[in-house]
């Protein structure tokens, strides 16, 4: 199954063109939607999740017309937004039971079995009777994945899921997403390059509502191969280098900036840098290629 987006447009009343002729083909597996805050990622996710209408264009999920058959989409959709509310004092098992009922799972025995399996899958069975409002950030996100998976969805959307998680919770979350992505279309919307690098077989870079790149991470890296150079400089030299070269990024190493520069040819005094998705991300955002 594929999710096919063609010429999608959305313009808000304040004049912001949040989606500008967006076209993507998203296969089964983990798909990374990478872009800075305000790039249009959430607008695209909300449109796919039937939470807002598009001005023009089309989206199909298999044989489902996403924009015109929202009920059919919602039956096969799991959605984890950036922030989600919970009922105060309600336990995980009771809340999942309620959500399963809302999704049409009326058989009590089947519903109970499904909820048990979901809580075990996301490592929350031990805490099933605890109020979700008392969970840590990582536990809440794992609960969010559990509610996403009610009914074995064909499409799962997660929007900026790892913000604020410690490394341990982040890894647990990655493992769950990877397992889901073996048989499901999973769209991971994020501004964190590491999320895409570690999880996704396909990706897109978006900014200002436009798709700047779509393909595999390997293809993205090929586009910058042999074109990224690095040098460690003194702090006071940074403005001059930014003026004289196409500086992609800089980070402090041992107290001094290590700069990455984009150039088709070698630069005296610079060493060839190992290509990474961080470079691709900043190169695309700055429209260097």
Image (cartoon, rainbow, N blue to C red):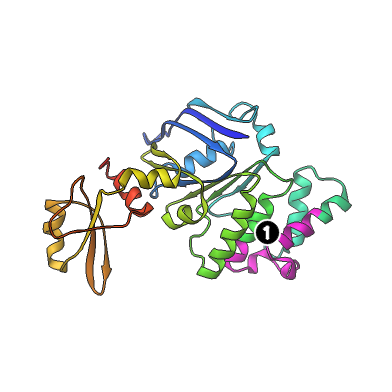
Q: Position of residue 29 (x, y in %)?
A: 58, 45
Residue 142: quarter of image? bottom right
Name which residue lies at 59% across and 64% down: 172
On the picture, is 101 further left or further right than 53?
Answer: right
**Where is 70 relative to 125, above or below?**
above
Name which residue lies at 56% across and 59% down: 174
Q: Where is residue 204 in the image (x, y as percent from the top left)?
A: 44, 42
Name which residue lies at 75% across and 43% down: 103
Name which residue lies at 74% across and 63% down: 120
The magenta span reads 114-141
Q: Which residue lies furthest to the bottom in this view?
A: 254
Q: Which of 201 and 190 is in front in this view?
A: 201
Mark count? 1
Q: Position of residue 233 (x, y in %)?
A: 17, 66
Q: Can residue 204 be seen in this view?
A: yes
- Quarter of the image where the N terminus is located: top right
Q: Is residue 192 visible?
A: no
* Label 1 sits on residue: 87
Q: Where is residue 259 in the image (x, y as percent from the top left)?
A: 23, 60
On the picture, is 217 further left or further right than 261?
Answer: right
**Is most of the magenta stretch helix, strand or loop?**
helix
Q: Residues within 10 Å of mark 1 (few under 14, many from 20)?
A: few
Verify whether residue 176 appears in magenta. Answer: no
Q: Is mark 1 on a helix, strand or loop?
A: loop
Residue 92: quarter of image? bottom right
């Amino acid at each position: 199954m594929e999710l096919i987006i063609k010429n999608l447009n959305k313009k808000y009343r304040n004049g912001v063109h949040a989606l500008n002729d967006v076209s993507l083909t998203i296969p089964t597996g983990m798909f990374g939607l990478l872009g800075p805050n305000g790039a249009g990622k959430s607008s695209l996710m909300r449109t796919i999740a039937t939470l807002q209408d598009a001005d023009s264009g089309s989206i199909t999920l298999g044989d489902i017309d996403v924009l015109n058959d929202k009920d059919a989409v919602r039956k096969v959709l799991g959605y984890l937004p950036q922030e989600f509310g919970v009922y105060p004092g309600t336990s995980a098992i009771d809340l999942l039971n309620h959500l399963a009922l809302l999704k049409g799972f009326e058989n009590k025995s089947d519903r109970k079995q499904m909820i048990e399996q979901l809580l075990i899958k996301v490592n929350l069975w031990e805490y099933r009777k605890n109020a979700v409002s008392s969970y840590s950030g990582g536990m809440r996100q794992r609960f969010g994945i559990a509610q996403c998976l009610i009914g074995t969805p064909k499409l799962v959307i997660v929007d900026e899921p790892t913000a604020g998680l410690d490394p341990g919770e982040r890894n647990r979350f990655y493992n769950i997403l990877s397992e889901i992505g073996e048989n499901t279309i999973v769209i991971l919307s994020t501004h964190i390059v590491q999320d895409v690098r570690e999880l996704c077989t396909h990706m897109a870079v978006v900014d200002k509502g436009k798709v700047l790149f779509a393909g595999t991470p390997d293809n993205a890296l090929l586009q910058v191969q042999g074109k990224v150079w690095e040098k460690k400089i003194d702090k006071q030299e940074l403005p001059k280098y930014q003026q004289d070269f196409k500086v992609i990024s800089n980070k402090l190493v041992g107290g001094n900036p290590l700069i990455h520069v984009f150039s088709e040819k070698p630069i005296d005094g610079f060493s060839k840098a190992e290509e990474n998705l961080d470079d691709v991300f900043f190169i695309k955002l700055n429209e260097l290629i």
